[in-house]
Image (cartoon, rainbow, N blue to C red):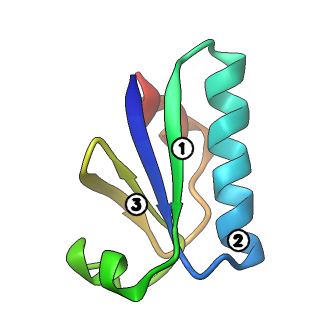
Amino acid sequence: MKIVKVLGSGCSKCEKVAQSISAIAAEKKIEIELIKETSPEAMMSYGVMRTPAVVVDEQLVHSGSIPHREDIEGWLQ
């Protein structure tokens, strides 16, 4: 199981990223644990300066925009 964290303030973009990741994982029948992290300390610990950001298995894979579907599918493989 992959652990996916969406880092951000809880804004609409952050929510959209979390929803997209959940939907694609369900569609592909990939088991994930999705964590929404809003604390500034957590974001700084990953070096995130722009949100939304995505961390997969403790590795920062994206920040600053809503990721494309192809990117999300690649992270979940």
Q: Secondary structure at mark 2?
A: helix
Q: Position of residue 77 (x, y in %)?
A: 40, 21
Residue tagged 2: 13
- Tag 3: residue type? His
- Which of marks 2 and 3 precedes in the sequence? 2
Q: Position of residue 52 (x, y in %)?
A: 54, 71
- Tag 2: residue type? Lys
Q: Residues within 10 Å of mark 1 (few under 14, many from 20)?
A: some
Left or right: 19, with 41 as reference point? right
Quadrant of residue 63 within the rendered picture: bottom left
* View extreme (top): residue: 29
Q: Position of residue 35 (x, y in %)?
A: 51, 52
Which numbered disc, 1 or 2, marks the residue closer to the eye?
1
* Residue ID at (50%, 29%): 32
* Residue ID at (39%, 22%): 1
Residue tagged 1: 34
Q: Secondary structure at mark 1?
A: strand
Residue tagged 3: 62
